[in-house]
Amino acid sequence: MFLVSLGVSAFYNAWLSSLDKEKNHQKLLFERVLAGPTLTKYTLGTRTTAVVPKKLLNELLPNDTNVWKQWKATILERLRQPSVQAFKFGGKARDLNGFTQEEKDLSKLLYEGAQAAYHGYQDYLQVN
């Protein structure tokens, strides 16, 4: 009896380890923890429609320092570009003249966060 239970346990553990855990964790997060959040995609064809995300950004992120203003402007500019390359921030040099080292570090962190959020969104689209 002991050997049978040991064999069944080993088989069950092998089966569990073969599952795609990351996909299951994502599904669990989106369905149970976040209760199936709705996502909104914006397409900005004209300047009039571009005002909506700008107001949303200013409302959601009311901080008005130079770093935040530059980050918001860059994000809005990238939203207006329909290309896949729009959210790659690494190669594009930003004008950081007059910024302190702390502001430069914050700027880098904000752009890395935007890049990570974009990649997370892309991964979410592939799962669903």
Image (cartoon, helix red, strand yellow):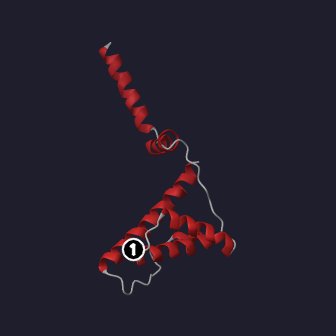
Residue annotated with mark 1 = 107
| Front residue (pair 15, 82) | 82
Which residue is painted at 35% across and 17% down in the image? 4
| Front residue (pair 71, 2) | 71
- Mark 1 secondary-structure assignment: helix
Coordinates of residue 12 in the picture (x, y in percent): 40, 28
> Does residue 16 lie above or below 5 as drawn?
below
Regarding residue 52, the answer to whether it shows in the image is yes
Coordinates of residue 122 in the picture (x, y in percent): 54, 58
Regarding residue 89, the answer to whether it shows in the image is no
| Front residue (pair 4, 82) | 82
Q: In this view, does 47 lie to the left or right of 95?
A: right
Q: In this view, does 66 lie to the left or right of 73?
A: left
The quadrant of the rendering that contains the N terminus is top left
| Front residue (pair 40, 27) | 40
Neighbour tally class for label 1: few under 14, some 14-19, many 20 plus, Cα within 10 Å: many
Number of marks drawn: 1
Disc 1 marks a residue whose amino acid type is Ser
Which residue is painted at 61% across and 56% down in the image? 40
Q: Quadrant of residue 98?
A: bottom left
Coordinates of residue 55 in the picture (x, y in percent): 57, 67
Looking at the image, which residue sits at the far top? 1
Looking at the image, which residue sits at the far bottom? 97
> Does residue 38 lie above or below 76 as drawn?
above
Q: In this view, does 109 lie to the left or right of 46?
A: left
Which residue is painted at 31% across and 76% down in the image? 102
